[in-house]
Image (cartoon, grey):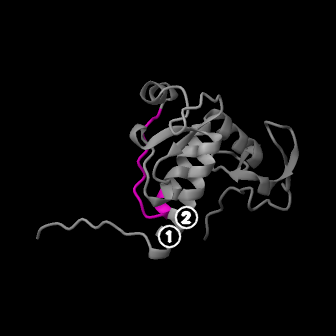
Amino acid sequence: MTKKRAATAADLGQLLLIRRCGSCGDRRSLIDFHRDRSNPRGRGYRCKPCNAARFRAAGPERSWSFNYRRRSRDAGHLPVVERVRLRDLIERDGAGCSACGDDETNLQLDHRTPVVMGGEHSLGAVALLCLGCHREKNRSDLERVRAWRATGPVLHVVMEAV
């Protein structure tokens, strides 16, 4: 004798193909909603695009941090993320570009060593650059990264005494 279980959205897929998003109000297919075991229908109340927009709006640095950590791990490095405040950078380097000294308003955050090569995201490893200097540096970094990738990343192995 088998015990009957409650029907889920997967079981009733033919009957529940369309659902209204609780956020934007659009009627969408069930595929456009994340699975949610706590919901009686087995799917979340918000559609995937609304969930993504909500996540990005809650904290853009969260998605940046997630991407940075993933890229670091993919490159074989341990990610180092330290909170970097613009105020601290300006106190250290001044309010202008750290390469040419231009007081441009469109300053960009530059990693002195590219993340893909093991660069950290910490106050000591970043600088403010104007758009022109940042582009020029990225061109030279691209050559360094290509050369680094051609030789292959060097993995640092820590050996313990036996």
The image's mark for residue 28 is none
Magenta stretch secondary structure, dominant:
loop
Q: What percent of the width, then of the height, locates residue 86?
A: 51, 29
- 61 shown above or below 136: above
Quadrant in which the C terminus appears: bottom left
Graded by Cα atoms within 10 Å as few (under 14), some (14 to 19) or many (20 or more), the crowding at tag 1 reads: few
The amino acid pointed to by label 2 is Glu
Q: Which residue is mark 1?
A: 147
Give the residue at mark 2.
Answer: 143
Does residue 145 appear left or right of residue 52 in this picture? left
Residue at image location 68% in from the left, 45% down from the top? 39
Coordinates of residue 3 in the picture (x, y in percent): 61, 64
Q: Measured along the vertical axis of the image, is residue 67 above or below residue 129?
A: below
At 50% across and 63% down in the image, what residue appears? 144
Asked if the stretch drawn in magenta spans residue 16, the answer is: no
**Which type of secondary structure does the marked residue at label 2 adopt?**
helix
Residue at the image position 59 percent from the left and 45 percent from the top: 134
- Type of residue at label 1? Ala
Secondary structure under the numbered disc 1 in the rendered image: helix
**Rendered-image quadrant of the N terminus:** bottom right
Relative to the observer, which residue lies in front, 70 or 47?
70
Report the front residue among 19 and 132: 132
Circles 1 and 2, Cβ within 8 Å, touching? The answer is: yes
Residue 102 x, y percent position in the rendering = 59, 31
Q: Which one is nearer the viewer's eye here, 135 or 35?
A: 135
Say which quarter of the image contains residue 51: top right
Label 2 Cα crowd, 10 Å radius (few <14 / some 14-19 / many 20+): few
78 in the magenta segment: yes
Q: Nearer the viewer, residue 153 or 92?
A: 92
Alpha carbons under labels 1 and 2: distance apart: 6 Å
